[in-house]
Amino acid sequence: MISTDVLVIGSGAAGLSLALRLAQAGRKVCVVSKTRISSGSTLWAQGGISAVLDADDSLENHVQDTLIAGAGLCDEQAVRFTVARGPAVIRWLVDQGVEFTQVDDDEQQGHKLHLTREGGHSHRRIVHAADATGRAVETTLVGLAEQHPNITVLERRVAVDLILDRANKRVQGAYLYNRDSKHVEAVSARAVALCTGGANQVYLYSSNPFGASGDGIAMAWRAGCRVANMEFMQFHPTCLFHPEARNFLISEALRGEGALLRLPNADGSPGERFMPRFDARAELAPRDIVARAIDHEMKRLGLKHVLLDITHKDADFIRAHFPSIHARCLELGLGITEQAIPVVPSAHFTCGGILTDLSARTDVGGLYAIGEAACTGLHGANRLASNSLLECLAFASAAADDLLATLDDQPAPAALRPWDESRVTDSDEDVVVSHNWLELRTFMWDYVGIVRTSKRLERALRRVQLLNGEIHDYYGNYKINHHLLELRNLVVCAELIVRSALQRKESRGLHYMLDYPKTFTEARPTILTPGSDPAQTR
């Protein structure tokens, strides 16, 4: 059994920044990664991190942009809390060695951070490292974590479940499935932080890596934590449409720098620009509006994709500002300096999640949730572009402060009971897992996607509950593997999404209902509580 002060499950920006802040203050931390330590969604973040760093901008501007994008459902206190911490977390990253893109500053006779603009932002406030910000942040933090003597990294481990002191409603650690040894290990800790990302692989088409299976959300729900706003699943408007690059995003920053969305002509060439018909902000409208507009045009015209056209910009400008996108597209035979890019919407971000306070604390003592796994109130009904990494960093900082102030008052890591593997056998029906995985993701895409109806949601609920029963039975009778664990968690998250969507009898932000097209005057969060519904997930 491994014992530590804080067990951090997840190795993206949230998990690594929390681990480093704790380790640098002298605490022992164990970081768990499902594959290699540098494999999370952070690695694929292209656009950047939103923070107010320009004299022409203000914290109030950033607050108002976030509230507008959130369609009235943001918690304003959480928004102000997060935005106010933006400049400090950027400075912390710079101090750690992250090399953001800079420009000459004639007034200071030196350099300053280059700021770009993305959809929904009224000012340039996106700090970036060319078009591969996530990679710059992740690789820097990974290097620091691997070298720090207070951090133990456990790679190729998949969290099975949290270990609880149920009498005191407190977490004691977690069981981890070792993908190499094929056995389950116990890790004991004073506190546990779920930094596990979202549940976007519940959909057939997703921009996220395959590990985005909602593990933290499902484990927290099974442990007794409330979840909130799970109906708000963000679809990124512009994922590359190409058979060899299913989850490659075309950053919102292209539209921020002037790229236009067009319908393809019969010969495939760029045709009519359509976004001005849907919103006065056109290509710079929030993601929910742009994704719905693309979805509408594709269905109306029977299109497989639309086109994102930046060919009117100087070729050197395109190569300099978007080197990763330019290079990847070129590998696929697409020269974006002279060709429009075929794009489609894809599931991208889970706006809801485990309900937390402003210190990232959940309903279970000693259990924290940070980043996409959490629902802090920042995003409301639709996340503003580049607020995701900001949330990871701001709440990792807040959680670190809270942990450093309270850890010594918490019980020492407990002796844990080993995982019982004697009651299960090997299965000769692993094909059931892959079939259920495909079925789940297909009906979620068809029935619980960008545009919804009550009939589709009710159909999805019946199917997800049937699948849930099958998977629960399979889980209890056969030896586990990481595919089964991810499927078990995805089906929990799928039911939470559908149940939340059925409760919201309006259209708001990312939740668009054909049979309830109006928006209520009062915005209320959707909060689900374990044990409140006899038909709820297991």
Image (cartoon, rainbow, N blue to C red):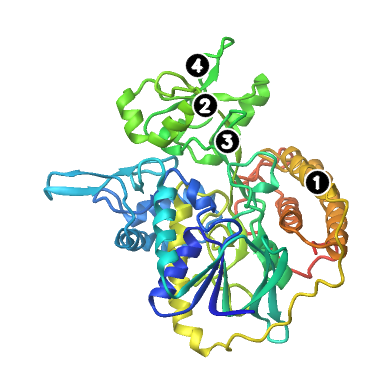
Amino acid under disc 4: Pro
In x, y percent, where is residue 81? Answer: 42, 65
- The residue shown at (80%, 46%) is 460
Q: Using a 10 Å C-alpha cutoff, classify the residue at mark 2 as few (fewer than 14 neighbours), some (14 to 19) or many (20 or more).
A: few
Amino acid under disc 1: Ala
Q: In terms of secondary structure, where does tag 1 sit?
A: helix
Give the mark nearer the N terminus: 4 vs 1.
4
**Tag 1 residue:** 460
Seen in the picture, residue 424 relative to 107 is either above or below; the reply is: below
Quadrant housing the N terminus: bottom right
**Tag 2 residue:** 332
Q: Are marks 2 and 4 in contact (CB under 8 Å)?
A: no
Give the mark nearer the N terminus: 2 vs 4.
4
Q: CA distance from mark 1 to mark 2?
A: 36 Å
Q: Using a 10 Å C-alpha cutoff, classify the residue at mark 1 as few (fewer than 14 neighbours), some (14 to 19) or many (20 or more).
A: many
- The residue shown at (43%, 24%) is 336
Q: Are marks 1 and 2 in contact (CB under 8 Å)?
A: no
**Tag 3 residue:** 291
In x, y percent, where is residue 406? Answer: 49, 84
Q: In terms of secondary structure, where does tag 2 sit?
A: loop
Quadrant housing the C terminus: bottom right
